[in-house]
Image (tube, rainbow, N blue to C red):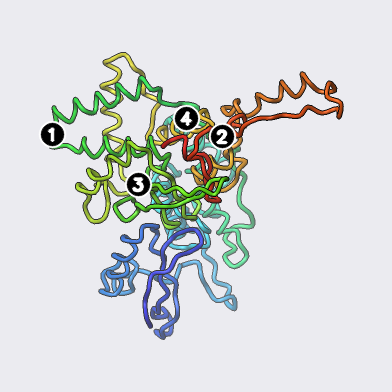
Amino acid sequence: MSITVKWKRSGIAYIDTEVPDQETGELKRARISFGTKDPRDAEEQRKQWLAGTHPKHPSQGGHKQDFYRRETSTNEKFEGTDLGTWMQKCLSDERVWGNCRATSTHRSNVKIIRGLLPEGITVEGITSHHIYELDRQLRDEQNYAPASRRKLLGTLSASLRRAAEPDVGLIPARPAFPAIKVNNVKDRVISVDEERVMFECIEARRNAEPLRQWAHFERLCRLLMGTAFRLGEALSCGPSNVKRKRWTDHTGKTYEGVWLGLSGAVTKGGKPRDVPLTKELQELLPILNQNQAGGRWFPWKPRTSGAWYLLQNICEDMKLRGYDMSDVVLHTFRHTCATRLAEGGLDLIGLRDWLGHSDIKITASRYVHLMNGHIHVGAAILDNYGTHPSGRMELEETPSNYGIPDNPANGRDGAIDGIGALN
């Protein structure tokens, strides 16, 4: 059987292969998920599988039949199943997480929850009282934020939901969980003044600590600020992501520019996305390419804390200079870039496509209040309503009156509007 890397709709890599059946020893088809969206990581795992060194390979004790799978003709019951053990077992079952791509997050959540569960608690013995008590511990004793509590309890909820499904039948129904209200909208943006001082602090760190990765961190911050990429998207970028694109404006004139493209394997929504590069980033490309390694511009892998730790250092430096950036995270750079685009006149559809939102409602709920320039003609409409012989006012407005920059390079390629505003 030829083994090639394939991709789920969620962007997760997997292979179709054959593994020995536990009971008969005969080979049977199996789908092995690699739990990654990174093509290079997926290819490396494929090579490990072929070499028999992959953790999920049968020779390494992996891909064993899940302990709750049993023949329906028997009355075997797994009574007294330890809840922590059950959650650990569920990590290898794709039916529990669906299309979820945060495998490493669930693995971490299971570890945290297991450490807080009452000793000896079983799947059959857990009640809503235990779950509410667990939430209290996460909130009051562990100081987890609402979003983190919901993710942690979500991992427990998914495993209990699986335990209640008919083919498992460990419990009749999943116990009730507390409703945790989370405000995911982050209003914090980095001001122009804060941005200037931040890069001054990074430069000072580069001079004082030349052996640390401050040069990479500075280039990462500039890329995040100029593209609104998520951190994982930015960390996957390298020379192969750069492309030249042509587009045509409403007059039929053709333009060409430098863009940065993301494959569906690394984006949150699983769809490819291209954004135009600012002049600053275009000038930065030679330095990025010169310092790339393994096809990537940055040395950190997704879901690692190296860049985050450097940001904490900079926030401390800025505090000494009178700037409070304690509430700034790397995702703040994305929100800052999006806010500047919205305030600068990029239309809602263009902003949606730039950010890669799956639904324009997400874009509108977060940024439409910043687009006040495109409705200013409404006052003129109301002022003149009924004064025109036809009962309507004849408006002679340029496209810029509707929030589109009056720039000859403002074209449309069917995906992104208003790119001329940044070039």
**Label for residue 404?**
2
The secondary structure type at the circle numbered 1 is loop
Mark 3 touching mark 4, by CB under 8 A? no
Instruction: Determine whether, in the image, residue 131 is placed left or right of residue 61.
Output: right
Q: Amino acid at mark 4?
A: Arg
Residue annotated with mark 3? 303
Which residue in the structure is indicated by mark 1? 210
Quarter placement of the C terminus: top left
**Where is residue 2 drawn, in percent x and y?**
37, 80
Q: Choose between 175 and 263: the one closer to the eye.
A: 263
Classify residue 86 as left or right of residue 232: right
Nearer mark to the viewer, of 2 and 4: 2
Q: Which residue is mark 4?
A: 340
Q: Secondary structure at mark 4?
A: helix
Tags 3 and 1 touching, CB below 8 Å: no
Measure how far apart labels 3 and 1 are at the Cα level: 25 Å
SS for callout 2? loop
Q: Amino acid at mark 1?
A: Pro
At a point 61% along the width and 52% down the height, the residue shown is 174
Sooner in the amino-acid sequence: mark 2 or mark 1? 1
